[in-house]
Image (cartoon, grey):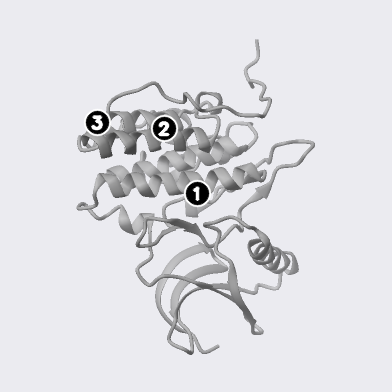
């Protein structure tokens, strides 16, 4: 199709990959490639998501530039800055400034908040799916795992393990807790993703999938500021709240996380020091949520 692939970025699933590529005019593009597998439903979903991204007026959701199709593949291209990197790639940079990490975290929360406000459960908040440009602005190029919250049920159930985001999967998303997957699941994945950004490692790291699932359900992650002493305590406390096993104990909204992180950046810019303050002072949800606990 005239594209020159030079850097595979993310394998979103066995059938879908993202690449950095050059087009015929030598422009840098993000290329999403979907391999047809004979399943008409999968193909229809891929095309539906592409059209959804075209229509969404949300800064940070990449809009398709063009679509091509062969007998074996569907291709979609997006504009991208050649310096764009994933959070996964950036997390290995030990020289990244705390200010830059905070800016990336704030941009991520802002994007999640906008999607949540339109009743999406994203289900794809993980370090290799979030792309950061040279201005520390975060973008999503794929919403294939996203679900729209039903006006009736308000929840989506998941009973499958997705290997792509097992490192950041919420306890309820493992399908082992008999609990619905709601927007709070995205906030747990956000906490694990930002833990990787600030600490250079995930909250839990096991080679065995079942050990990883068990850890997400039962183990408490080492606080980020203890795992890495260069991480301010206040940021460690924010991440710990996001990583609570019980969804009701996490932040209620991405906007609440955003406000706390912006306050951290404000303190850092003013005093080069982030002091400890009460969490979630502006964390209010307009949704009525009932506890799952039986009394």
Question: Is 7 situated left or right of 51 in this image?
Answer: left
Q: Where 265 falls versus 65 (above or below)?
A: above
Q: Mark 1 falls on what kind of element? A: loop
**Residue 210 in view of the camera:** no
Q: Where 233 falls versus 16 (above or below)?
A: above
Residue under label 1: 125
Q: Nearer the viewer, residue 134 or 128?
A: 134
Q: Of circles 2 and 1, which is in front?
A: 2
Upstream in sequence: badge 2 or badge 1: 1
Q: Mark 3 falls on what kind of element? A: helix
Residue 98 in the image, given as x and y percentages of width and height: 26, 44
Mark 3 to mark 2: distance in Å? Answer: 20 Å
| Residue at the spot 36% in from the left edge and 39% down from the top edge | 203
Upstream in sequence: badge 3 or badge 2: 3
Residue under label 3: 226
Mark 1 to mark 3: distance in Å? Answer: 24 Å
Q: Which of 8 and 143 is in front in this view?
A: 143
Question: Is 78 situated left or right of 278 in this image?
Answer: right
Q: Nearer the viewer, residue 63 or 48?
A: 63
């Amino acid at each position: 199709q005239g594209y020159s692939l030079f850097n595979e970025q993310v394998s979103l699933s066995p059938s879908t990959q993202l690449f950095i590529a050059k087009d015929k005019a030598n422009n840098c593009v993000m290329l999403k490639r979907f391999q047809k597998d004979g399943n008409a439903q999968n193909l229809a979903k891929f095309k539906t998501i592409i059209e959804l991204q075209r229509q969404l007026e949300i800064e940070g959701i990449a809009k398709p530039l063009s679509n091509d199709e062969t007998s074996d593949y569907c291709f979609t291209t997006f504009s991208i800055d050649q310096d764009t990197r994933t959070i996964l790639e950036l997390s290995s940079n030990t020289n990244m400034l705390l200010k830059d990490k905070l800016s990336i975290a704030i941009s991520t929360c802002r994007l999640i908040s906008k999607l949540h406000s339109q009743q999406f459960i994203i289900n794809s908040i993980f370090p290799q799916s979030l792309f950061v440009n040279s201005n520390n602005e975060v973008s999503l190029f794929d919403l294939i795992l996203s679900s729209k919250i039903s006006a009736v049920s308000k929840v989506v159930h998941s009973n499958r393990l997705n290997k792509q985001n097992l490192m950041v999967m919420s306890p309820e998303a493992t399908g082992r807790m008999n609990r619905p997957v709601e927007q709070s699941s995205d906030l747990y994945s956000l906490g694990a993703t930002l833990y990787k950004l600030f600490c250079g490692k995930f909250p839990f790291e096991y080679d065995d999938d079942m050990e990883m699932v068990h850890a997400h359900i039962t183990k408490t992650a080492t606080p980020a500021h203890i795992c890495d002493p260069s991480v301010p305590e206040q940021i460690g406390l924010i991440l710990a709240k996001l990583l609570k096993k019980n969804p009701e104990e996490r932040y209620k909204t991405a906007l609440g996380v955003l406000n706390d992180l912006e306050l951290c950046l404000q303190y850092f810019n003013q005093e080069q020091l982030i002091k400890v303050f009460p969490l979630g002072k502006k964390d209010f949800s307009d949704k009525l949520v009932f506890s799952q606990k039986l009394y």
